[in-house]
Amino acid sequence: GADYVAALLSAARKDYDKSLELARLAEKRGAPSFGVKLLLGDVYLRRGECEAAARQYELALAEQPRSATAFVGSGMSRICARDSARAAEAFRRAATLNPYLSSARLGLAIALGGQQRVEEAAQSMARAMSLAPSRALAHLYASSFASGSASPSELGLAARLDPDLVEAPVALARLAVANGNFEDGERYARAALELEPGNEDAQRALGSALAFLGKPPQAAEALRLLKPLAVRRPEDAETRYFLGVAQAQLTNWPEAREEFEAYQGLVRSDRTLS
């Protein structure tokens, strides 16, 4: 129906709140259930609502248990939730159902990389790129498999292949910050936010760059960006670290200490779980 088409168009424009509203309305009005569930899963995924996305893909698979596309969505929702093992299982199912689906191989590479199975991940990535050599996301993720660190050339190629791919400038921003190029990190992160203003990964990348730039106005902006993320992502250790840096730049020593202690606690918890 018209609501479903409008929801698809809103998602294409990256207006995920509107797309979610329209998709729910379409579902109530009897739009094709499977398509709506896939769309809802995709929208929840883009909003970072991992479990809500996973539930929609599960419902879609209950209707069409041999849908490779739904298994890819399910795998991406598990990547979102940092469950690499279940993600790999979903991507393998998708690849079995459709051996020529590059997104299944790409997702499997990401999931295997999350399990530190680098050789297998590289093989899956190579297969993904052979199936779709111009796929921007493949170049984005391939950037880290050859040397174990992000490749600026591959990231740049991903950005050129798909100028609307927000993940590319986000990855370039992270790479710039990791290399101490904080002004470049700020530039790339702001470019990502122009593509998708609500993208939380871009907000975190910008917050990290601003925190390290060392000037009070930038540090204050970093706090405005990072504090809400720390609430929405309480398990994210790096966000707490960047908050500590920003507080230290503003000489808010008690607050900086609190953030660094929270960061250390999260890192210890991650090591215990692994």
Image (cartoon, rainbow, N blue to C red):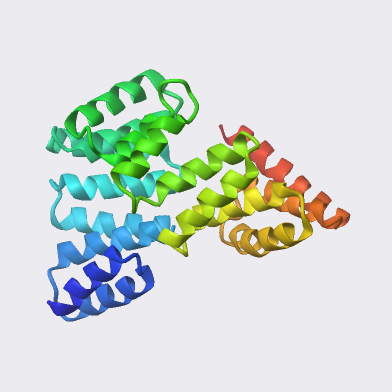
Q: Residue furthest top?
A: 119
How far from the left and from the top, in percent, is residue 179? 61, 33
How far from the left and from the top, in percent, is residue 129? 24, 30
Comparing 256 with 84, the one in front is 256
Q: Residue at x 48, y 23 (%)?
A: 148
Quick one: quadrant of the C terminus? top right
Comparing 149 with 240, the one in front is 149
When asked about the image quadrant of residue 127, the answer is: top left
Up the image or down, 259 lies above or below 26; here it is: above
Up the image or down, 53 lies above or below 8; here it is: above
Quick one: quadrant of the N terminus? bottom left
Comparing 87 with 191, the one in front is 191
Up the image or down, 156 lies above or below 119; here it is: below
Apparent side of residue 146 relative to residue 207 in the rendered image (left or right): left
How far from the left and from the top, in percent, is residue 76? 34, 46
Q: Residue at x 17, y 31 (%)?
A: 131
How far from the left and from the top, in percent, is residue 213? 71, 48
Work out whether residue 123 can be spotted. Answer: yes
Apparent side of residue 234 relative to residue 79 in the rendered image (left or right): right
Up the image or down, 2 lies above or below 195; here it is: below
Q: Residue at x 51, y 49 (%)?
A: 188
Apparent side of residue 166 relative to residue 21 in the rendered image (left or right): right
